[in-house]
Image: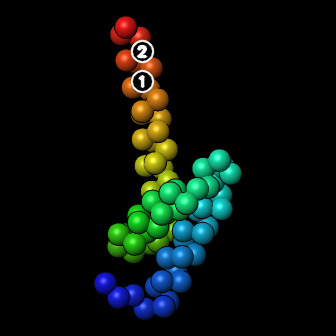
Amino acid sequence: MLLDSEKANEMQAAVDAVFVRLPKIFRTKETRIEIAKGVVCSEGEYHEAARRCVLRMFASVDRAIENREKLANLK
């Protein structure tokens, strides 16, 4: 897939804007790659796609912690 430079710049700006707002502990190369993947796969509003990606990542972490706590209570 080839992108024009304007779209590539918009995507990069969206990733940068969301990434810089994360707490320092979450600003990792892996997190940045996940946000970029979400933006590239989106159709349209890149800033919104970047925010949704971060929300999904944190929701997954919250769910994992919650499930671990539930499993610990079963023992």
Q: Secondary structure at mark 2?
A: helix
Q: Residues within 10 Å of mark 1 (few under 14, many from 20)?
A: few
Q: Taking 63 as reference, is 14 left or right?
A: right
Q: Residues within 10 Å of mark 2 (few under 14, many from 20)?
A: few
Q: Taking 22 as reference, is 72 left or right?
A: left
Residue placed furthest toward the front: 29
| Quarter holding residue 75 | top left
Q: x and y percent of residue 51 in the render?
A: 50, 59
Q: x and y percent of residue 66 in the render?
A: 44, 26
CA separation, marks 2 and 1?
Answer: 6 Å
Q: Label 1 amino acid?
A: Arg
Q: x and y percent of residue 26 in the render?
A: 60, 50
What residue sits 43% from the left and 91% below the top? 4
Q: Quadrant of the N terminus?
A: bottom left
What residue sits 58% from the left and 56% below the top? 28
Between 13 and 29, the one nearer to me in the picture: 29
What residue sits 61% from the left and 67% below the top? 17
Q: Label 2 amino acid?
A: Ala
Check disc 2 and report the residue beneath it: 72
Between 26 and 44, the one nearer to me in the picture: 26
